[in-house]
Amino acid sequence: MANTLKTYLDAVRASLEACLCLTTFPSQQVERHNKPEIEVQSSKELLLTPLVVARNEDEKVLIESSVNSVRISLKIKQMDGMDQLLAHWFCRFLMQRAEQFIVLRRKAVDGFDLSFLITNTNLEKMWKHKLIDFVITFMEEVDKE
Amino acid sequence: MILLEINNRIVEDTLRQKFDNALAGNKPDSVDITIADFDGVLYHISNPGGDKTKVMISISLKFYKELQEHGADTLLQREYGPFITSTEQGYDVSLLFDLEAVPADKDEVVKKAGLLKRNCFASVFEKYFQFQQEGQEGQERAVIHYRDDETMYVEAKKDRVTVIFSTVFKDDDDVVIGKVFMQEFKEGRKASHQAPQVLYSHREPPLELQGTDAATGDNIAYITFVLYPRHINKNARDNTINLIHTFRDYLHYHIKCSKAYIHSRMRAKTSDFLKVLNRARPENNVKEKRTITGRSFQQRN
C-alpha cells in the first residue's frame, strides 16, 4: 500500500513540475484583462491536454493546464459511508477557507473532491517547488487519515 | 465513555442549599426556578402560597398519562410518601418540603428529589420486569411517546424483556455516525458475556413492531435491547433502569460530541496545511537601496 503511494506521488510531482510553467497572458477577448485561461477557456490554442494520474478507480488527480493557469483536482479514496462523510466535511471545511489558502478553489470540479487553481501571479509570489511540496504533502496527509 | 447523570443536579443543589440554610437557622429566601431536563421534562421549584418555609418541587412530563397507566403513582407514593402533595397547576407531580421540619436523612431526601424523573420512568420498567419474573406472558406492550417523534416500547416475554427505542436523526450525517455506534453496541457481546443483546434496524421497524403504526422513514432508527433475567433480578434492576431510561439522550449526546471532536481535528489540520503553504512564500525582505548621491528608495513588489 505504501509502495504505490510513493510512486503515485512521484508521478504527480513530475507532472506538476512539467505543467507549472506559467507565464502571464493578457486576455485576447477583453482589453487590459488578465484572466486564468483554464477557467475562462476562451480559446483552444491556449489550453493543453488534460492529464489524469490515477492510482486506482477511487483515487486520481486531474491536471488541466493552460498558458497562464493550472487546475489540479483530487479525488480522495473513500471506502465506506463514514469515509465519505469525513472526506465531504473536510473538503467543505477547507473550501470555505479558500481565501486563506490562496491556491484553493471554492468549488471542486465535477466528479472530484477538491480543486486547486494556480495562476502565474501565484507563482511569482511563491517558490514553485515549495508549492508542489504543499500539494504532495496535502495528498499524503489525507491518505494517512 | 461518559455516562449521562441520571439525577438532576440543579434540583439537588437547590434543595440541599435550602435545607442547609434552614438548619443553620438563617431566614429562608424565596425561590422560583424553572428547570428543563432531557426529553422535554420541566421542573419547577417554588414557594407555594408565598410561604418561604415551604419548598415545592413539581415535575411536568408530556407523557405522564402513559406512565400513570403503568403505575407511576404507586411507585412515587412508595418513594416519596410523605412529601407528595396536591399537584401544582400545569404540572404532573408535586413534592412539598417543609424547611421548618428538615427530615433527619436530608441527604437521602435530596438525592431522591433529584431522581424524580428517573422514578417516573421506573414504574414502567419495574412493572414489566415483574411480569417476566413471574413468568406472565401475553401482556400488552407498553408504548411511551417520550418525545415528539420518538417512542419507547417495553414488552415482557417468558425469559426476557425487550425494550425498543425509536429515534429520529435530524441530520443525515447523524445517521451514518449512529450506524457506526450501533455496530459497536451489537458487538458488545464479544466484550462481555453479561451484556444484553442489542439489535439495530434502520428505516424499518423490527419484526416485533411490524403491523403496528410505528413510524418509518430514512431518518428513523430502531434499537432493541434484549434484557435477560440477570439484568432484571433485584440486584441489577435499579442499575438497569438507570442506564436504559437515558439511552436515547446518551446516544445523541455522544454523536454530537464526536462531531465536535472531528471539527476540532479538522481545524488543527487546516492550520497545519496553512503553515506548509506559507513556507512556499519567500520572505519579503524590504531592500532599501541607496544611490551614490544619497537618495534612497525601496523595492516594491
Image: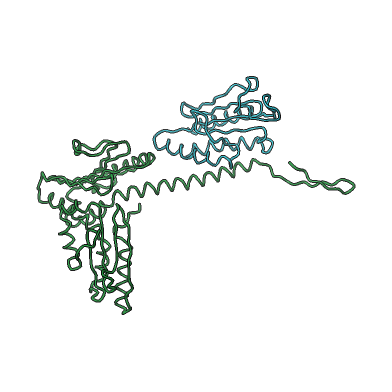
Kindly identify the residue that appears in the image at 20 percent across and 47 percent down.
B227
Q: Quadrant of residue B220?
A: top left
Numbered circles on residues, count: 0
> Considering depth in this image, is B143 or B33 the residue closer to the camera?
B33
The chain letter of the cyan chain reads A
Q: How is the image coloured?
A: by chain
Furthest residue in direction bottom, as rendered: B25
Residue B208, how many percent across, how many down?
Answer: 19, 39
* Vertical relation: A140 (above or below) A45: below
B228 sits left or right of A66 in the view: left
Quadrant (top left/top right/bottom left/bottom right) for the C terminus of chain B: top right
Residue pushed farthest top? A44
Q: Residue at x 39, y 35 (%)?
A: A81
Q: Is residue B192 left or right of residue B128?
A: right
Q: Position of residue B167 (x, y in %)?
A: 29, 43
Place residue B30 in its image quadrant.
bottom left
Residue B11: image quadrant is: bottom left
Q: Is residue B147 above or below residue A26?
A: below
Q: Is residue B28 above or below residue B78?
A: below
Q: Position of residue B191 (x, y in %)?
A: 29, 46
- Name the residue nearer the viewer: B45 or B202: B45
Residue B271: x percent and y percent?
55, 46
Query: According to the rendering, which colour does chain B have?
Result: green
| Residue at 59% over, 38% down | A134
